[in-house]
Image (cartoon, rainbow, N blue to C red):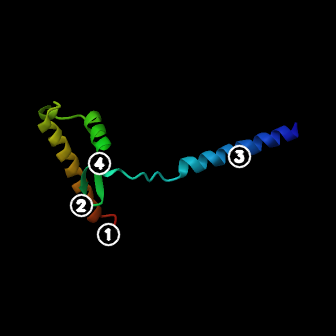
Amino acid sequence: MQVLCKKIQISTLGVFTFSLFIFCTPNQTEIPPEKILAKIGNRSISVNEYIERVEYTIRPTYCKSDNNIHQKIMLNSLIAEKFLALQAEQESALKK
């Protein structure tokens, strides 16, 4: 009985260690250049980020359609957010 308990403890420890190794490794996948819509400083806007933001955010009534102009408005909004993030990073009160 004690041998079975020790085997279970060892296998549980092994599974825990393996899952810790797998889930805690940094995910540093490089975005292919053909999937980048815009680069602002050291940040970029990928196609997937753009699609997620357009689908999951509440849009104002003037750009709720899927035509070309409304898509450009959403992309410009994302670019403006990246510029603001860069500016806030440089002028952060916490850094000073």
Q: Earlier in the sequence, mark 3 or mark 1?
A: 3
Which marked residue is nearer to the observer: mark 4 or mark 3?
A: 4
20 or 69: nearer the viewer: 69
Q: CA distance from mark 1 to mark 4?
A: 38 Å
Task: Give the residue drawn at x 29%, y 61%.
Answer: 89
Q: Earlier in the sequence, mark 4 or mark 3?
A: 3
Q: Position of residue 33 (x, y in %)?
A: 30, 52
Q: Earlier in the sequence, mark 4 or mark 2?
A: 4
Task: Give the residue drawn at x 86%, y 41%.
Answer: 3
Is label 3 in contact with label 1 (beta carbons under 8 Å)?
Answer: no
Residue linked to disc 1: 96
Three-letter amino acid code at disc 2?
Gln
In the picture provided, is 68 more to the left or to the right than 45? left
Q: CA distance from mark 4 to mark 3?
A: 43 Å
Specify few, some or many for label 1: CA neighbours under 10 Å numbering under 14, 14-19, or 20 or more.
few
Q: Position of residue 25 (x, y in %)?
A: 53, 52
Task: Give the residue drawn at x 57%, y 48%.
Answer: 22
45 or 77: nearer the viewer: 45
Which marked residue is nearer to the observer: mark 1 or mark 4?
A: 4
Q: CA distance from mark 1 to mark 2?
A: 14 Å
Residue linked to disc 4: 34
Q: Earlier in the sequence, mark 2 or mark 3?
A: 3
Q: Secondary structure at mark 1?
A: loop
Residue linked to disc 3: 13
Q: Position of residue 37 (x, y in %)?
A: 24, 48
Q: Secondary structure at mark 3?
A: helix
